[in-house]
Structures are given as structure tokens and as C-alpha cells.
Amino acid sequence: MFISDTGQLPPSGGARDDALLDTRDLGLATLNSVLTAEVLAASTSGASGEADSSASLANVVVLPGNAAQVTASFVQAESQATCSGVSGSSEIVGLTFGGMTITVTGQPNQTVTLPGGATLIINEQTTTSNGTFRQIQVNALHLIVPGVAEVILSSAESDINCTGTARGPCQDFVTGGGWIVTTGTSHGNFGLNAGFKAGSLAPTVHLNYIDHASGMKVKATSITVYRPGPTPTSRHFAGSAAVDGVDGYGYSVDLADNGQPGKDADTFSITLSSNGRVVYQAGGTLEGGNIQLHKPCP
């Protein structure tokens, strides 16, 4: 079963995205017994000799109550393929496995095994290079419990065939997932894809946001504005939203991609309004995650 999956791009490239506010919204008892997670976001794009993918989720619990239970407050994978090579990375925050706190090294294919054979592979990376074809797959977490389950969290895959690679049409859109501090130590988690897909004359949006101080859940239902912000790598977008399942709200988001990695660099802010009155505001520098602006060609 795939959850929040973009699918593969055609050979001509383009952009795809998918998002889900909460896995429990799917109403699948079998899934809930294996996995719960919030603010899922996935994106993939390919153009002008570069392919990029990312996937993220928050507040995940895998195999609840099992001896091999996995929990994490944030899980993200990113991958990139170009004609000069491939690269990938993962960010995992607050990871536990079998009741133990796990220190994430950041190195590819870090492996932890429990007595009984349950195995967790962290920042799993596999690459393929064959002539002009290059591919990388990054699984932020890969849990294998023999006879019980196999679960992959936040998987990103990018590939490119450099034979006759041509510069395609330039598109401007932004993707990201992560969290900010709202009040005290409470988090505001977000997952988003916004902007212009290949060949589109109008912007599209997936935006999910949860304020864990109040439990408020926000889901964008439309986008009416997408434009540059005050700096070359910032963007502003706005539209209509449902808050806790109730329509009739407006939202506006301002964000900036200030480099890699996004933690302690990128910024995100959100404002909600109702009947012309601001009812919620939060923003700041990312405490975790990443925002990526997919820029037009030079």
C-alpha cells in the first residue's frame, strides 16, 4: 500500500505532488493498526537536466504496541539526479525503535537490529548508474520485522537519462515539509506544494498545517495568488482553506528557501482569516525540515 504517492513522471518530465493531512482520515482500520502519521507531503519534478523528489511526514507511529515500535516527530527524504551525478539525504527527528532512543548519524544505510531480528535501516540509499542512466532512491526509514510487517517511511526517487537531454520549459513552484515553534515548545507542522506545474497557466496547491498547541488542522481548498516575495528565493501564496473541516477561511503563506539544509535557515509563516478578520498567525525559522524553490531557468 502506498500513501501520499506522486507516481512516476513521464520521460518528458514535469511535476507531480500529493499530500494528506492525517492517515487516520482515510478510515482504514488495518492501516491504523500498522501506521499513523500526520502532514504527509510528496513531490517530484524533472526538467532541464535535473530531477528532484522529496517526501516528508510528522508524528509517526509504526506498529503501535509492538516490541519493534518506531516513533519519530519528523521524517523527510530528498533525492536529486543530474547528468553529473546523484545525491540524497534524510532528516529524522525524535527517533525511537523498540523503546530505545536512536541517535541518527546522517550516514547512508545506518542499521539498528533488535533481539529477535527486527531491523531498522536509517537513510537507506541505493544508486544505479548504467551508461547515460543515473538513479537514486532514498528511504528515510525502512523497518523490517520478519513475519510481521515491512514499512518504508518517506521514500524519494530520482532518475535521469542524459542522452540528448534538452532544456525544457521553465516552471516556478515550491515544495516543503517541516515545522516551526508556535507557542512555548509547541510545534506547527506543515507540508506543501504550490505553484505552476508544467504546461499550466494557473497555480495549484496542496497545503496541510497542524498547530499542536491547539490541535487545529488546516487544509487549503484553493489558491488564488502565487507570486514572488521580497527576496529572489521567497514566495507568497494565498487562497481558501478549511479549518478543522469547516470551510470559509482564507489563508496566506509566506516562505523562503534560504539554502540547504532548511533547518535554522528557511522560513515559513501562515495567516488565517475569517470574515475579513485575522484569526491566527504563526511563523518563524524552520526548526526542522526543508523548503525548496524550484526556480525558472536562468
Image (cartoon, grey):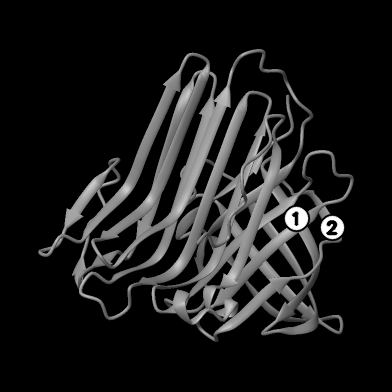
Which structural element holds mark 1? strand
Residue marked by disc 2: 225
Residue under the image location 33 percent in, 54 percent down: 142
First reached walking from the N terminus: tag 1 or tag 2: 2
Above or below, comparing residue 278 to residue 138 in the picture: below
Which structural element holds mark 2? strand
Residue marked by disc 1: 236
| Front-lying residue, 184 or 169 | 169
Name which quarter of the figure residue 127 lies in: top left
| Front-lying residue, 162 or 271 | 162
Hey, which residue is sitting farthest front in the picture?
A: 147
Q: Position of residue 106 (x, y in %)?
A: 30, 45
Q: Position of residue 116 (x, y in %)?
A: 12, 64
Q: Identify residue type, mark 1.
A: His
Hey, which residue is sitting farthest left in the picture?
A: 115
Q: Position of residue 178 (x, y in %)?
A: 51, 60
Q: Quadrant of the C terminus?
A: top right
Badge 1 crowding class, 10 Å Cα cut-off, few under 14, some 14 to 19, many 20 or more, is some
Q: Residues at badges 1 and 2 in contact (C-beta under 8 Å)?
A: yes
Q: Identify residue type, mark 2.
A: Val
Query: In the drawing, what numbered circle is on residue 53?
Result: none
